[in-house]
Amino acid sequence: MKRERSGGPGRVLLIVGFVLAALNLRPALAGVSPLLSDIMRDLRLTPAAGGAITTIMVACLGLLAPLAPALAGRIGLDRTLLVGLILLAAGVILRSVDGLAALYGGSALAGAAIAIMNVAMPAIVKQHFPSKVGLYTAVYVSCLVAGAAGASAGMVPLAGEYGWRAAAGSAAVLAVVAAVFWAPQAFRRPSIKKAPAGHRPYLTLLGSRMTWFVTAFLGLQSLTFYVMLAWLPTIFQDAGLPADEAGYLLGLTNLAQIAATLTVPAHAGNARSQVPHIVVAVLLTAAGYVGVLLAPATVPWLWMIILGLGQGAAIALALLIIALRAPDPASVTALSAVAQSSGYALAAVGPILFGLLHEVSGTWTLPLLVGLGACAVQLLFGCLAGRPEDRRAQAGSSGRSSSA
């Protein structure tokens, strides 16, 4: 494993590049929703065609996650992250030019870039900050959430001033800046070395119960998150709250997530078992669901803070466990690819199922009860994933992987 470098300009540049890269993990995705009505009006898209922009990107997060280990095995992790940033800038620019082919093609390219970066980031943490996995997981997950919140808040004012194309394309600027700061790290001589045996951990990982515990926990966490992201404003409006207040409440839960992502991984990363943290995170998420179910218009700000704390802690813990459970950066990349590919495929079902249940039942009670059931299953798999593995077994698995 690569040793952490001591302080100095190189170390500062590494951290700045890492933070900037993390800020790029969600703006291209989160910035679409606020602009969707403008995009649909300008291009004369149906609601289904407009929704397909986000659907394409989320689908790519799952389907194209295996690209990252393949790239890392050939060019190394640092250069893989740089490739992701360059592809992201290209995809965002492409989808902002005229034409439906460019819109959907650019969205797919941006989604592929985010998929690569999603998988690479836990391994980057393991490679460059092996003794501070919890702290730097907290840093990058907080940047992920902050980037999403910033894009959601900033797109409408930008579109009002410069038009939706310029607003949508603005995410490319951040990607280019991050690529410039990360490039020195990617082309340092030690980073030219390819990731060792990037493909080999797959056979061992696919046969490990821990892989599927982590995958199920990440997938169910994402499902319960994307369900609320998609439907919370509508639920609040149906409960009698004005549309602007419903939007502010969604923003509040994002702020609460940042508070959790900044603190929980740093603490949980130093613990032998992450089970207690997972229990608290899932129970807070479930409590937020219960509040929205029983009294959506009564102190909704409280339900959003509780929900945000739970969901922010849960996603941070899922990504932390990926970095902690795998023994080396190549294994982290492989585990991250398996967990995120399968997990996002599971999560993609959530918003659609939630909407269908609402359509069938005519109320939000049944969908929210199903969401609470998903929280219960998430708790089960989270407790299984959060238990520390036997070190001798882990060493044996690593040895078998190395001799494959």
Image (cartoon, grey):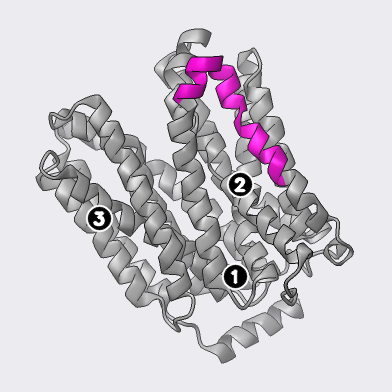
Residue placed most toward the observer, 1 or 211: 1
Name the residue located 31 percent from the left edge and 44 percent from the top edge: 252
Which badge, 2 or 1, is on the more N-terminal residue? 2
Q: What residue did someone put label 1 on?
A: 205
Q: For the residue marked with disc 2, what is the amino acid? A: Ala
Q: Which quarter of the image is occupied by the C terminus?
A: bottom right
- Eyeballing the image, is 282 above or below 403? above
Per the rendering, the mark at residue 306 is 3
Pair 2/1: label in front: 2
Give yes or no for residue 35 being in the magenta stretch. Answer: no
Quarter-wise, where is residue 217 in the image? bottom left
Instruction: Judge whether residue 7 can be spotted in this image.
Output: yes
Q: Which mark is residue 86?
A: none
Q: In whole angstroms, how far apart are the C-alphas of marks 1 and 3?
A: 34 Å
Callout 1 touching callout 3 (CB < 8 Å):
no
Q: From which residue to which does the magenta span run? A: 156-178
Label 2: few (<14), some (14–19) or many (≥20) C-alpha neighbours in 10 Å: many
Q: Secondary structure at mark 3?
A: helix
Q: Residue at x 71, y 62 (%)?
A: 12
Residue that lies at the very extreme toward the bottom in this rendered image: 392
